[in-house]
Amino acid sequence: MKRFFSSAFSRGLLWQLIGTLAGAGLVTGIRALMGLSVTDTFFFTEPAWVLGGLVGAVSYLFGSGVTADWVKWARGMDTPEHPEEHFSGWEKYINVSLDHKVIGIQYTIVALLLISIGGLFALIFRTELAASELQFLTTDMKLFGQNGPQLYNTLMSLHGMIMIVSILLGIAGIMNYVVPLLLGAQDMAFPRLNAFSFWIAVPAAVLLLMSLVLGGFDTGWTGYPPLSARAPVGMQMFFMGVFVAGWSSILGALNVIATVLRMRAKGMTAWRLPIFVWASVATSIIALTATQLIGLSFQLVMFQRLFGMGFFDPAKGGNPVLFQHLFWFYSHPAVYVFILPGLGVISELLPVFVRKPLFGYRWIAMSSLGIALVGFVVWAHHMFTSGMNEYLRVPFMYSTLLVAVPTGVKFFSWVATIWKGKISTPTPMLFVLGGIVVFLMGGLSGPPNATVSTDLHLHDTYFIVGHFHDTIFGGFVFPFFAAIYYWFPKATGRRMNETLGKLHFWLMTPSFFVLTFGMMYIGLLGMRRRIVDYDPALGFDTTHLILTIAGYLIATSVLVFFYNFFNSIKNGEKADGNVWNSRSPEWQVPSPMPTHNYDQAFEVVGEPYDYGLEGSKYIEFSTSAKSKH
């Protein structure tokens, strides 16, 4: 425990606490000298909490030591290339590291932790919804200064954003670990910036969770004004948490693009890049160019609350609909930030377990860029009911439907790849197939939301909730689990238990279909989303009870995964070689991966997915002993 409390993670949390109190105390002292109130809720005023939260986040970075190398460099001092070599075992994952593999695992662990927290919040409010009328989140209860319905609003809102942040971190985890290995690079282009991108996400997550104990908020994950302009101070913590997390996304995207452009192995031309790399580039382009918009929209509401600016206040000449345009200009392309890496994982793994070349490689590669491009011109389909100008509806309807074209390219290519293949179904392949089917359900339920006439009926119903969960689970969560099961032996030198992995899959998948189909069913019948109670006369009690049971079964399957994951780190079957018989370069060297990845450089001499073609090779190392499949 001593080593844990002396780690960068713990030091950062301590410094964040000190910085928060110092920042809040500074504002409180200034207000006292000016004769202004020094408290309005939870010991401090809202401006004090805002500055305190900001100072705390910056303090975390200095306290953790992630900025130490830059300070030493500015002073002309030497900086170690791999400081994590001073730590062994689990310690290197709670301290600052410049190794992209360690950083990838750090991202993944924090993502799994946040998924657990967000899922716990969902189980709480899902249990409340199991029957009509208030069960335990009653108006009489009080927790964190909130009664039951207010707490429901906060948990529901935080569930959405915590899950989104966890997905962003999970994506960063996969890309950080895998992209340099697929390229033949020794590390990311900017290792110190890479470490900074991870460590800035940790105080962002803390800020998000602080919103729960500082009065919460009732806006949903979107933070729409005018509700967000008058919500409790927890709203500001929510805004700052997302704002800080956005820096992690932007800087990480910049690093991925630079790495792909400058650090490919000899012979790895554009049309010999692994598909996951194409997906990562498309994702990073969106994150680099669009993330500023959600930060800007939240920042403007923060300023409206703090300084009385009227950006979205009609009484001061502002327009609330402007917020929605700014917010969704990022937040719909962000859906493709979530799913493009997942679709890349599907395309990367499918040929391995089908033992056939990937059908339509170039079309799949270009479809990722096509989805990224079209994704920037569809945002206003979220606003058909917002009161925006009606003449904008039809163009956005057509542009939204157009997204189905590059997405359909992927589906047809996957089906053609599977056709007459020699299919094997270990756990990663099960989650790949599950992801395809679940994402298909999300795709098929999408057009009714894209067409104006049906969206006017379905908007803000549980049909949207079911569609969105299908899209995100199929586009990211299933592929995320597939990626973990697939690359776990490469990271640890051990395999996860296949029996437990298949139990995880077969427990989660049917339960998830019950959950989302049930959501869409009651949505079609008029069940509104984001409400704590519903009329028993509607007859939704039985359906909601079934949905709640399905939610608990999904949670149980995730617990099985966690047990399998952590138990296999020490007790899993040893897996030193090419356990999946893959052509990919990372599987041609021993597991776990050495610190510097490849002791010998390799050259790309063939196509990445020519499985089943006799005599075909993808890469060649500099010695004959290293030549591969």
Image: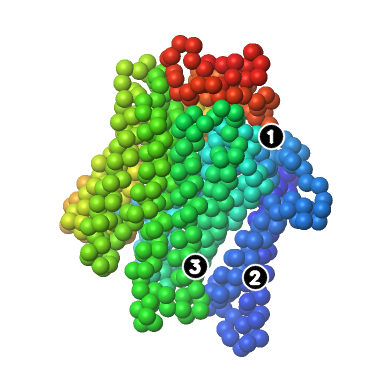
Q: Nearer the viewer, residue 582 or 53?
A: 582
Residue identifier under label 2: 23
Q: Nearer the viewer, residue 98 or 500?
A: 98
Q: Residue at x 24, y 47 (%)?
A: 447
Residue identifier under label 3: 299
Q: Determine the image quadrant of residue 625.
A: top right
Question: Does 375 appear above or below 593?
Answer: below
Residue contact between numbered discs 3 and 2, judged by CB atoms under 8 Å: no
Amino acid type assigned to the residue bearing label 2 in the image: Gly
Q: Residue at x 59, y 80 (%)?
A: 38
Residue identifier under label 1: 89
Amino acid type assigned to the residue bearing label 1 in the image: Gly
SS at circle 3: helix
Q: Determine the image quadrant of residue 1.
A: top right
Q: Nearer the viewer, residue 142 or 467?
A: 467
Instruction: Say if residue 513 shows up in the picture.
Output: no
**Neighbourhood count class around disc 1 (C-alpha, 10 Å): few under 14, some 14–19, many 20 upward:** few
Instruction: Say if residue 452 shows up in the picture.
Output: yes
Amino acid type assigned to the residue bearing label 3 in the image: Gln
SS at circle 1: helix
Q: Residue at x 64, y 13 (%)?
A: 624
